[in-house]
């Protein structure tokens, strides 16, 4: 809770100051479609703060926006491997959430994580896995390997979507090739490029826009995509023949985090919003909407029944799960070269 809130009641002037703050704005930039209207309405009703949401479709786009000075954003939601980059670039405000009461609700293994070891800059918002979703009405064969995505059978060729985010695509290709994540070896990255170039003629679209991917899967415009677990569940609810795959090579995992960009005009409102989102009942609203896994304890009583046994949210025992890493400058340069070459 912020300093103004702590001293509420100390005097009429402070009370008026808080009231004026509560009637203010909050400018959020996030992955597209991350907030249910119900959640934002609830926050506005409780606080009087109106939330405006802008969106991006890759961590790289967010980094570019913030480096350019943003447009007055108060809250952003980068993936975990980008938090150290944003801190290093001096693009985040330190607000020490680990010292706030709500931080106790964060699941133990995501408190003070490796990407924010002091809990100074970020609070986990949602987490999940990245793998392959395929329409089993079109494809009847085995789904136990990432070969399905990178060396697709005839019935899926030209029916595939890949993310347009270099990091996620290169990470998944590295998992398939059994190459270390964030490799600095040019020969290994050449293998990644060769794989992605060989796959490219079979790729119909490169997009990370979750809503568009879901609609295209449901309508049959595409039959397979690199996708996130919760988003795949939402797609399956539209088209039951869709299956989320747990390949033998493993799946990538990610954590999206709430942060306050440097120069936020409404930092107190940002802190209130982050505390609000970290309450179990509100975190459950987020999970019910996005279908990904929640990093907040105590959400279970508030969850929709459909989440209890959804295969997209329950990773099979023995599945290799790899969290994306924060790459070195050398690895980032190599990855950028691979992506630029691929997109020519």
Image (cartoon, rainbow, N blue to C red):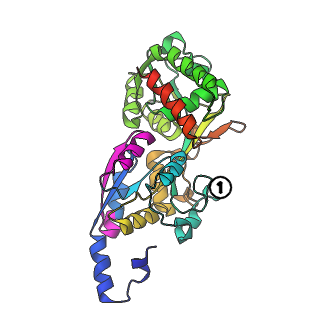
Q: Which residue in the rendered view is the most extreme toward the right?
A: 318
Q: Position of residue 16 (x, y in %)?
A: 28, 81
Query: In terms of image quadrants, where is residue 6?
Result: bottom left
Residue 59 colored in magenta in the image: yes
Label 1 Cα crowd, 10 Å radius (few <14 / some 14-19 / many 20+): few
Whether residue 19 is in magenta: the answer is no
Name the secondary structure under disc 1.
helix
| Vertical relation: 287 (above or below) 196 | below
Query: Where in the figure is residue 141, as x and y percent of width and height?
Result: 60, 16
Total of numbered circles in the picture? Answer: 1
Is 263 on the left-hand or right-hand side of 197?
Answer: left
Q: In the rendering, at what x and y percent does residue 265 appear?
A: 32, 63
**Seen in the image, is 325 located left or right of residue 222?**
right
Q: Is residue 212 left or right of residue 139?
A: left
Image quarter where the C terminus lies is top left
Do we see residue 120 in this rendering?
Answer: yes
Which region is colored magenta? 44-71
* Residue wearing tag 1: 109
């Amino acid at each position: 809770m912020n300093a103004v809130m702590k001293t509420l009641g100390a005097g009429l002037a402070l009370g008026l100051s808080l009231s004026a703050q509560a009637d203010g704005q909050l400018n959020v930039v996030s992955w597209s479609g991350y907030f249910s209207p119900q959640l934002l309405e609830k926050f506005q009703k409780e606080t009087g703060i109106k939330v405006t949401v802008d969106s991006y479709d890759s961590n790289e786009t967010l980094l570019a926006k913030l480096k350019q000075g943003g447009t007055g954003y108060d809250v952003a939601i980068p993936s975990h491997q980008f938090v150290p980059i944003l801190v290093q670039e001096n693009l985040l405000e330190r607000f020490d959430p680990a010292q706030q009461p709500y931080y106790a609700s964060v699941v133990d293994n995501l408190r003070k994580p490796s990407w924010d070891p002091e809990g100074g800059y970020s609070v986990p918002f949602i987490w999940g896995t990245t793998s392959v979703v395929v329409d089993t009405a079109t494809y009847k064969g085995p789904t136990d390997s990432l070969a399905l995505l990178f060396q697709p059978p005839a019935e899926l060729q030209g029916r595939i979507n890949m993310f347009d985010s270099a990091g996620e695509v290169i990470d998944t290709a590295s998992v398939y090739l059994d190459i270390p994540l964030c490799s600095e070896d040019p020969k290994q990255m050449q293998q990644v490029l060769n794989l992605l170039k060989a796959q490219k003629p079979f790729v119909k679209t490169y997009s990370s826009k979750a809503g568009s991917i879901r609609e295209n899967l449901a309508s049959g415009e595409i039959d397979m995509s690199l996708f996130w677990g919760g988003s795949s569940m939402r797609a399956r609810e539209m088209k039951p023949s869709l299956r989320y795959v747990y390949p033998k090579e493993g799946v990538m995992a990610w954590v999206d985090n709430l942060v306050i960009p440097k120069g936020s005009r409404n930092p107190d409102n940002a802190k209130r919003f982050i505390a609000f989102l970290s309450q179990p009942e509100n975190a459950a609203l987020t999970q019910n909407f996005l279908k990904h896994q929640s990093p907040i304890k105590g959400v279970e009583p508030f969850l929709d029944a459909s989440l209890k046994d959804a295969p997209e949210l329950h990773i099979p025992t023995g599945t290799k799960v790899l969290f994306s890493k924060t790459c070195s400058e050398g690895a980032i340069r190599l990855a950028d070269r691979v992506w630029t070459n691929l997109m020519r």
